[in-house]
Amino acid sequence: MPRIDQLDAPSPTEREAILAPLDAFSRAQGFIWQPEPLTLVLRDDEGRIVGGAIGETNWGWLHLTVLAVSQDLRGQGWGSRLVREMERLARDRGCHHVWVDTFSFQARPFYERLGFTVFGTLPNYPARQERYFLSKPLERSEERDRP
């Protein structure tokens, strides 16, 4: 008889075993789940990490999961540069869209200035706040280079 156990920190082998039935089902439908990690690091003059971006590409989309810039570097364009570089690398991988999520106390206006639009909202997460899901199409390089 099956049972349910809690794992505090699943090993890579346990995680792979958990995902195996979902992967098999998706493959049978013609969708192979093979996300490719994509990470950029922002370093200061001494080589210390002061921010960066983490995401993954799959099925023609970039999912930007983390964008962080240290407080003393904010407002200097580093976040925009990181997003643009992630987008460029995603286009090189054949991606046509990017999506991200953020919170009402974080960066929704920042992403909107970069051309993202909200496609979903999760209210009261965290309490008295909202979580926003935003996306945008990625322009092909010839579209970006037009005068």
Image (cartoon, grey):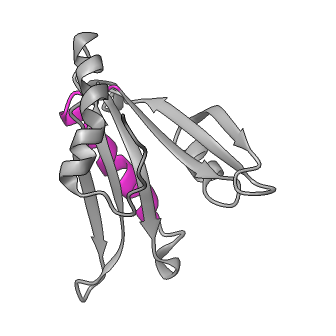
Place of residue 138 in the rendered image (x, y in percent of width and height, measured from the top left) = 37, 30
| Count of numbered circles in the view | 0
Depth order, front residue of 137/127: 127
Identify whether 10 is placed above or below 101: below
Identify whether 111 is placed above or below 7: above
Q: Residue furthest front?
A: 1
Place of residue 97 in the rendered image (x, y in percent of width and height, measured from the top left) = 39, 29
- Residue depicted at x 40% and y 42%: 3
Q: Is residue 115 left or right of residue 44?
A: right
Residue 38 visible: yes
Q: Residue furthest top?
A: 29
Main structural element of the magenta stretch: helix, strand or loop? helix
Identify whether 61 is placed above or below 48: above
What residue range appears in magenta? Answer: 77-96
Place of residue 38 in the rendered image (x, y in percent of width and height, measured from the top left) = 24, 49
For the C terminus, the quadrant is: top left
Place of residue 77 in the rendered image (x, y in percent of width and height, measured from the top left) = 46, 63
Residue 116 visible: no
Q: Is residue 91 left or right of residue 54?
A: left
Identify whether 17 is placed above or below 107: above
- Residue depicted at x 30% and y 50%: 85
Depth order, front residue of 126/64: 126
- Residue depicted at x 42% and y 50%: 65
Q: Residue furthest bottom?
A: 46
